[in-house]
Image (cartoon, rainbow, N blue to C red):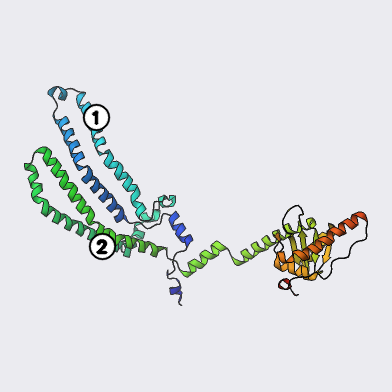
C-alpha cells in the first residue's frame, strides 16, 4: 500500500474522536431542518390563531381611530393611548412568540441534539483572513451550498407563482369586502399561503438532512495512522505501561510481605515454594492464602516467617497445589480442606506442646493431594 493511500481517511471515527468533536460543537446540523421547523410551526400557529389575531387587530384599530377631539388635543392622552396600544399588541402576540421561542430551542434536538460548547464560541481569527477564505469559496461544500440555495429559490418561487395565480382573484376582491371581513379573509389567505410555502420546503429538508449526516461522518473519519496515534496516546507507550506494571507489582508484593508475620503456618516445598496460610477459627470461612511466592520471593517469605516465629511445614505436593490453585487473599478450594486441616492440626498441637514444654509432635507425612491438584516441578 502506498503512502498516499495510507493517509486516506477511510476508517470510522473512534469514540474518543466523537467525544472530542462534540466538545468542540462539531455535530451534524441542518439549517434547512431548523428553518423548516420554525416556518411550519409559525404557519400552524397562524392557522390556529389567525382569527384571534385578526379580531385583536380590529379591536385595536377601533379603539385608536375613534378618538374624540378633546382626547386628540390633550397633551397627555396620546401617550396613555400609545401605552395601551403597546400593551395590547404585546399581549396579542405573546402566545405566538412564546411558542416560537420553544420551537427555536427544540428544533436542533431533531438532528444532533442540543449542546453548549465554549470552544465553538471562541473567536476564530483565521476565518477573517480573506486569503484563507478564497479556497472555501471554490470548495465542494461551497458549491453544494450554492446549488442548494439556487434550488430552494426555484422551488419556493415556483410554488409561490402557482399559489398567487390561484388566489389572485381573491386578493383583488379584498378591496370590495367590508373592513372586518377583509381583514379576516386576508389573514386566512396569508396563513394558507404561508403553510403551503412552508410545506414545500420539506423537499429541501429530505435532501439536506442525509447530506449533512454523510458530510459530518466524512469529516470525522480517520486515517490508520491517526487511530494508531490515538491508541498510543490513550493507552500509553509500551515501555511506560511496563514500568507501571512493575511499580504495581512491587507495591502488591510489599503489601503481601507485610501479611507474612500474621500467618498461622508457612507451607514450603521446602526451597522453591512458600505459601502463607491464615485461618480464623471464629468465622465460618475457610483458610486463606495471604502470601505466596517462588524461588527468591519464597526465600524472603521464609525469612520473614522465621523472624516472626511463624512455623514452617515442608510439604512439596501441598505447596505446589496451593500455589497454582489459589490467588492471594482467597480461600483455599474445598478439595484441599483435608490436607490443610492436617497441617493446621499439627500447628495447634505444636503450639500447645511448646507452651507446656511437652515433646513436640512429628510433622504430618503422606499428605494426600487430589490428582487434579498435583503439580510437577
Q: Assess whether mark 1 and mark 2 are in contact (beta carbons under 8 angstroms).
A: no
Q: Which residue is nearer to you in this view: 104 or 328?
A: 328
* Residue positioned 18% across, 49% down in the render: 192
Residue 9 image position (x, y, % from top left)? 42, 68
- Earlier-in-chain disc, 2 versus 1: 1
Residue 362 is left or right of residue 123, and the answer is right
Residue 128 image position (x, y, % from top left)? 36, 54
Check the image and report above or below for 65 versus 107.
Answer: above
Camera sees residue 18 = yes
Secondary structure at numbered mark 1: helix
Check the image and report above or below for 82 versus 361.
Answer: above
Dot 2: few (<14), some (14–19), or many (≥20) neighbours within 10 Å? few
Specify the farthest residue to the left.
176
Q: Quadrant of the C terminus?
A: bottom right
Camera sees residue 333 = no
Residue 189 image position (x, y, % from top left)? 15, 47
Residue 222 is left or right of residue 284, and the answer is left
Which of pointers 2 and 1 indicates the residue nearer the eye? 1
Mark on residue 83? Answer: 1
* Residue positioned 11% across, 54% down in the render: 166
Q: CA distance from mark 2 to mark 1?
A: 48 Å
Residue 368 image position (x, y, % from top left)? 78, 70
Check the image and report above or below for 193 versus 211.
Answer: above
Quadrant of residue 281 in the image? bottom right
Quadrant of residue 200 in the image? bottom left
Quadrant of residue 97 in the image? top left
Secondary structure at numbered mark 2: helix
Mark on residue 21? Answer: none
Dot 1: few (<14), some (14–19), or many (≥20) neighbours within 10 Å? few
Check the image and report above or below for 306 versus 376.
Answer: above
Q: Which residue is nearer to you in this view: 151 or 298?
A: 298
Mark on residue 147? Answer: 2
Amino acid at each position: 500500500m502506498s503512502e498516499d493511500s495510507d493517509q486516506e481517511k477511510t476508517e470510522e471515527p473512534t469514540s474518543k474522536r466523537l467525544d472530542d468533536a462534540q466538545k468542540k460543537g462539531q455535530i451534524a446540523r441542518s439549517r434547512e431542518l431548523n428553518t423548516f421547523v420554525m416556518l411550519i410551526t409559525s404557519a400552524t400557529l397562524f392557522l390556529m390563531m389567525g382569527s384571534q389575531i385578526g379580531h385583536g387587530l380590529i379591536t385595536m384599530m377601533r379603539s385608536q381611530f375613534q378618538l374624540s377631539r378633546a382626547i386628540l388635543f390633550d397633551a397627555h392622552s396620546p401617550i396613555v393611548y400609545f401605552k395601551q396600544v403597546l400593551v395590547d399588541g404585546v399581549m396579542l402576540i405573546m402566545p405566538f412568540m412564546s411558542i416560537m421561542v420553544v420551537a427555536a430551542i427544540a428544533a436542533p434536538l431533531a438532528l444532533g441534539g442540543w449542546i453548549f460548547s465554549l470552544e465553538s464560541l471562541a473567536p476564530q481569527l483565521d476565518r477573517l483572513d480573506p486569503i484563507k477564505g478564497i479556497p472555501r469559496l471554490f470548495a465542494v461544500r461551497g458549491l453544494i451550498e450554492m446549488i442548494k440555495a439556487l434550488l430552494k429559490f426555484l422551488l419556493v418561487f415556483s410554488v409561490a407563482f402557482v399559489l398567487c395565480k390561484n388566489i389572485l382573484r381573491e386578493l383583488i376582491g379584498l378591496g370590495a369586502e367590508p373592513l372586518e371581513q377583509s381583514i379576516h379573509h386576508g389573514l386566512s389567505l396569508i396563513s394558507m399561503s404561508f403553510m403551503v410555502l412552508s410545506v414545500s420546503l420539506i423537499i429541501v429538508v429530505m435532501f439536506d438532512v442525509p447530506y449533512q449526516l454523510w458530510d459530518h461522518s466524512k469529516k470525522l473519519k480517520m486515517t490508520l495512522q491517526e487511530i494508531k496515534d490515538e491508541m498510543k496516546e490513550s493507552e500509553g507507550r509500551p515501555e511506560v505501561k511496563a514500568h507501571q506494571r512493575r511499580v504495581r507489582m512491587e507495591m502488591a508484593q510489599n503489601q503481601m510481605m507485610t501479611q507474612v508475620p500474621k500467618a498461622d503456618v508457612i507451607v514450603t516445598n521446602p526451597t522453591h515454594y512458600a505459601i502463607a496460610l491464615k485461618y480464623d477459627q471464629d468465622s465460618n470461612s475457610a483458610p486463606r492464602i495471604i502470601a505466596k511466592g517462588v524461588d527468591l520471593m519464597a526465600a524472603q517469605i521464609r525469612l520473614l516467617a522465621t523472624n516472626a516465629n511463624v512455623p514452617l511445614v515442608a510439604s512439596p505436593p501441598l505447596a505446589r497445589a496451593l500455589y497454582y490453585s489459589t490467588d492471594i487473599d482467597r480461600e483455599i478450594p474445598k478439595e484441599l480442606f483435608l490436607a490443610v486441616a492436617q497441617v493446621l492440626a499439627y500447628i495447634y498441637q505444636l503450639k500447645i506442646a511448646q507452651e507446656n514444654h511437652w515433646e513436640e509432635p512429628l510433622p504430618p507425612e503422606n499428605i494426600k493431594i487430589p490428582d487434579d491438584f498435583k503439580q510437577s516441578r
